[in-house]
Image (cartoon, rainbow, N blue to C red):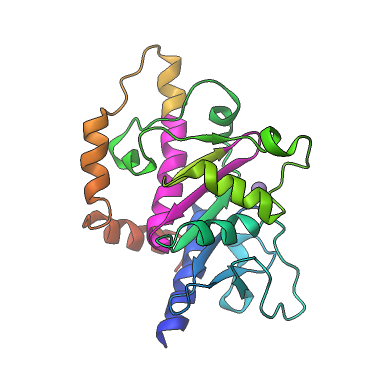
Amino acid sequence: MTALTEAIDTLVTGNRILARENVVDAFGHISMRHPDDPSRYFLACSRSPELVEADDILEFALDSKCIDDRGKTLYIERPIHGSLYQARPEIMSVIHNHSTAVIPFGVSKTPLRPIVHVAARIGHEVPVWDIYDNFGDTDILVSTNDQGQDLARAMGNGPVILMRGHGATVAGLSVQDAVMTAVYLQVNAQLQMDALRLGEVTYLHPGEVDIRLARSQKFVGNDRAWEYMSRRAGR
Ligand code: MN
């Protein structure tokens, strides 16, 4: 396998893990910046992540125009990916999903905050972007570069943003990093909803989140979790 073939294989695995962990269903997608050309990224054609194969992966410029679509249909919301790669040179992978667990936190006044150690990677408090604020009535989908850039601005330097009435977007320093964040974002949302039913909640303290964030990239458990989730996803 060449390095590029191996990278695309990792992207396919990322698709399968997100499907296996129910972070995505028929909809949702994960992309990866081209490892050798920062002005390009890879994303599947319009197909559900559980079914994505290496042959479905297409190459895009950062304005989200496809280099060669080979006659395949494209995801409408690819500006989410291109705009984030354009805004943030450090980002190597982007995930967009409609995880049902996070929706309540995007439409209410209760912020999504880390409640369990493995979810500290979502950051101190997850911001919410509302497409209505700058674009009024739309079909809610991020279908233009203007909308993608507005989303990227709202996300700032953070790893996650919720999208009101829609879902979430996650940015990572690698495919593995983005996948872990998306999986534990969903876990945290489920647990936070459960805990809130019991009354007052003790969240992770800010200093605890900082300590976890500082080590999250080199944490030995990352490889273990990736191997485990890949196996569960049949990879
Ligand atoms: Mn969407």
Task: State which quarter of the image contains the C terminus.
Answer: bottom left
Question: Magenta region: which residues?
Answer: 163-191
Q: Is residue 171 above or below residue 128?
A: below
How far from the left and from the top, in percent, is residue 85? 51, 61
Let me know if residue 187 is in the magenta part: yes
How far from the left and from the top, in percent, is residue 21? 49, 50
How far from the left and from the top, in percent, is residue 156? 46, 44
Q: Which of 200/212 is in front?
A: 212
Q: Residue at x 53, y 45 (%)?
A: 153
Left or right: residue 123 versus residue 16 is left
How far from the left and from the top, in percent, is residue 198? 40, 14
Where on the picture, by quarter, is residue 226? bottom left
Left or right: residue 20 versus residue 218 is right
What residue occupies the far top of the structure in this picture?
199
Q: Which of 1/83 is in front?
A: 83
Q: Is residue 187 above or below residue 93?
A: above
Residue 47 seen from this side: yes
Q: Which of 28/94 is in front?
A: 94
Q: Residue at x 49, y 67 (%)?
A: 32
Q: Residue at x 22, y 34 (%)?
A: 208
Left or right: residue 146 versus residue 169 is right
Residue 25 seen from this side: no
